[in-house]
Amino acid sequence: MLELMRAGGWLMWPILACSVVATALVIERALTLRRSRIMPEDLVSRIWQLHRQGKLGADQIEEIREGSPLGRMLAAGLVNLSHSREVMKEALSDAGRHVVADLERYLNALGTIAAVSPLLGLLGTVVGMIKMFTVITSAGVGNPALLAGGIATALLTTAAGLFVAIPTLLCHRFFEGKVDRLAIEMEAQALRLVEVMKGEREDAGES
């Protein structure tokens, strides 16, 4: 690996840095965007049970808020439970935008790495070609060994840039789609909460 790094030239180091950062971000997002962490099972039903039992006080709402991103969103609606349906929905919508923004954290960074890595590889290709033509200008083409350094720089940096960019782009697209699905599901749960708490559903266990 060190030999490849040396052969690829100095541009291999920023490409390596991109791969390390991308790997860390992918692991962090994979752990953060688990559905069980974002949307605990039967949260709306548990809230309804607390409400029916008269136990849905400020402490319980704060516990719900701290429990999960969905809980944070629903708690914003529960705080406005005494207000009209429109006020409650607006509070849920505002909280939902903040929650989704948190879920999208670092996705722009992943997209940037996916875009920059092949450009770094392309820059390495240009640097390698310049190195080759410099050697040709000074020593001619009689000694292929002198051209090997430029060829290695051109090929290795291109391959390394693509090696980093392709999986990073795939992970970026996957996490974007996952956030979109979670946002839709959380919106459905928020609407269900409004219907339940405002009396349009007698049974919080309905789908």
Image (cartoon, rainbow, N blue to C red):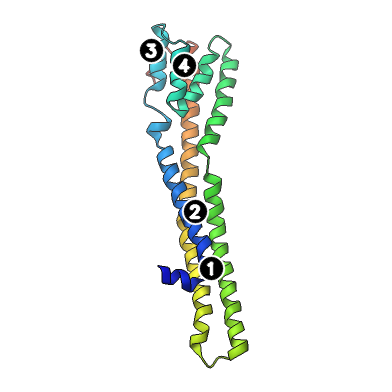
Kindly report the distance in space between the C-alpha atoms of the residues bearing marks 3 and 1.
62 Å
Give the residue pinned by disc 2.
Answer: 169
| Camera-nearest residue between 18 and 206 | 18
Look at discs 2 and 4 and give the one toward the viewer.
4
Which amino acid type corresponds to the residue marked 3 in the rendered image? Answer: Gln
Q: Is 172 displayed left or right of 35 in the figure? A: right
Q: Give whichever of discs 4 and 3 has the lower sequence position.
A: 3
Looking at the image, residue 118 sits to the left or right of residue 40; the answer is: right
Other-residue count near label 4 (Cα within 10 Å), few / some / many at <14 / 14–19 / ≥20: many
Which residue is the site of mark 3?
A: 49
Q: Which residue is mark 4?
A: 61
Q: Is residue 6 above or below residue 92?
A: below
Q: Amino acid under label 4?
A: Ile
Separation of residues labelled 2 and 4 (CA atoms): 39 Å
For badge 2, the amino acid type reads: Leu
- Residue at 47 percent across and 56 percent down: it is 19
Question: Considering depth in this image, is 7 or 40 the residue closer to the camera?
Answer: 7
Q: Along the line of sight, which residue is nearer the eye, 103 or 13? A: 13
First in residue order: circle 4 vs circle 1:
1
In three-dimensional space, the C-alpha distance between marks 4 and 3, rounded to whole angstroms, equals 13 Å
Residue bearing mark 1: 10
**Residue 65 point in image, percent of width and height:** 47, 22
Q: What is the number of callouts on the image?
A: 4
Up-down: is 156 above or below 39?
below
Which three-letter amino acid code belongs to the residue tagged 1? Answer: Trp
Q: Position of residue 77 (x, y in %)?
A: 53, 18
Q: Secondary structure at mark 1?
A: loop
Task: Examine the rendered structure and indicate whether residue 22 appears above or below residue 204.
Answer: below
